[in-house]
Image (tube, helix red, strand yellow):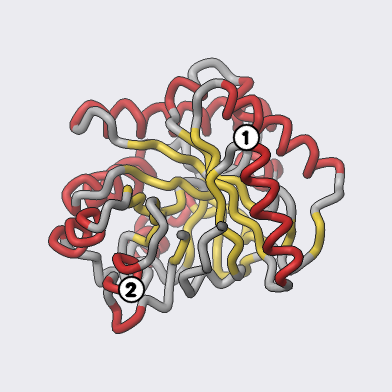
């Protein structure tokens, strides 16, 4: 299950009652600074679930608690706005200040709260940053820097807790860069089969993403597929794809504000 907002009564009891064995949730119940407490994560884990903490590593939303200080004191870290999400900006994720002020504290919080791992969104920043804002950089150099950040998170977190899961979301093509596959335990893949909402994913990039997800699966990595569909026939079809491919999956809404019914 994959829920980032709309937690019933602001807690995790409903997720604990659900039958799924893996949950991706935000670090905070309000996506700001009302952090989930260690005893809450322990209760969710006691239901037999592995629990991953969601946060972004290549961009920053205006509603996140780090944003005001970063904008005031290190505004040059913020780059172009994300066209799909106008309240969110891509960042200089290779800058040491980004690690010190945002990424490391988030990993520390996930470790302290007792999460089983982290679910890292926006590796795709390497494709979306406006190159005019970063003179001397190209896509390949940006990709190498993203791989370096994921590897740094992996080494740092596993150094404190061996077995801590590192699961980036999307950009499975980064597997082609040295060190990336070894740094991760799995990958989250959005819209492999259905785009938001109920639109079959038939573009060329869909087949490319599926091929890369299969390659990571064959390398022993868990694939967490997330598709966006409501029509029963599309939900069933997505679930059938997961079974065929050997992926774990959920078919849910783009708002990620509810517990979707499990497949099968």
User: For the point 39% across and 61% down, which residue is it?
Assistant: 19
In the picture, the quarter occupied by the C terminus is: bottom right
Residue 249, labelled with which disc?
none
Viewer-side residue, 139 vs 136: 139
Q: Reading the chain from its start, which is encountered first: label 1 or label 2? A: 2
Describe the element under mark 1 as helix, strand or loop: helix
User: For the point 39% across and 36% down, which residue is it?
Assistant: 166
Residue 9 position in % (x across, y down): 29, 84
Relative horizontal placement of residue 66, taking residue 198 as reference (left or right) = left
Residue lying farthest left? 39
Q: Which residue is mark 1?
A: 172
- Residue 60 versus residue 17 in the image, above or below: above
Residue 14, labelled with which disc?
2
Describe the element under mark 2 as helix, strand or loop: helix
User: For the point 37% across and 61% down, which residue is it?
Assistant: 26
Residue 131 position in % (x across, y down): 69, 41
């Amino acid at each position: 299950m994959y829920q980032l907002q709309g937690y019933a009564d602001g807690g995790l009891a409903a997720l604990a009652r659900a039958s799924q064995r893996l949950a991706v949730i935000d670090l905070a119940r309000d996506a700001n600074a009302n952090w989930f407490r260690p005893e809450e994560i322990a209760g969710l884990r006691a239901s037999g679930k592995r629990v991953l903490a969601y946060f972004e590593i290549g961009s920053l939303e205006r509603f996140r608690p780090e944003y005001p200080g970063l904008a005031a004191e290190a505004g040059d870290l913020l780059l172009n706005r994300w066209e799909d999400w106008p309240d969110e900006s891509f960042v200089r994720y290779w800058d040491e200040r980004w690690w010190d002020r945002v990424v490391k504290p988030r990993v520390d919080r996930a470790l302290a709260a007792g999460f089983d791992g982290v679910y890292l969104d926006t590796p795709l920043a390497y494709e979306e940053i406006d190159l005019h804002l970063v003179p001397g950089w190209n896509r390949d150099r940006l990709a190498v820097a993203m791989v370096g950040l994921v590897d740094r998170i992996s080494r740092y977190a596993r150094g404190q807790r061996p077995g801590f899961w590192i699961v980036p979301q999307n950009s499975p093509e980064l597997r082609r860069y040295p060190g990336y596959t070894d740094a991760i335990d799995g990958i989250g893949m959005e819209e492999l089969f259905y785009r938001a909402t109920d639109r079959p994913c038939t573009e060329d990039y869909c087949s490319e993403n599926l091929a890369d997800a299969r390659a990571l699966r064959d390398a022993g990595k868990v694939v967490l597929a997330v598709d966006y569909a409501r029509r029963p026939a599309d939900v069933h079809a997505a679930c059938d794809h997961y079974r065929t491919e050997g992926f774990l999956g959920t078919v849910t809404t783009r708002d990620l504000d509810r517990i979707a019914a499990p497949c099968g």
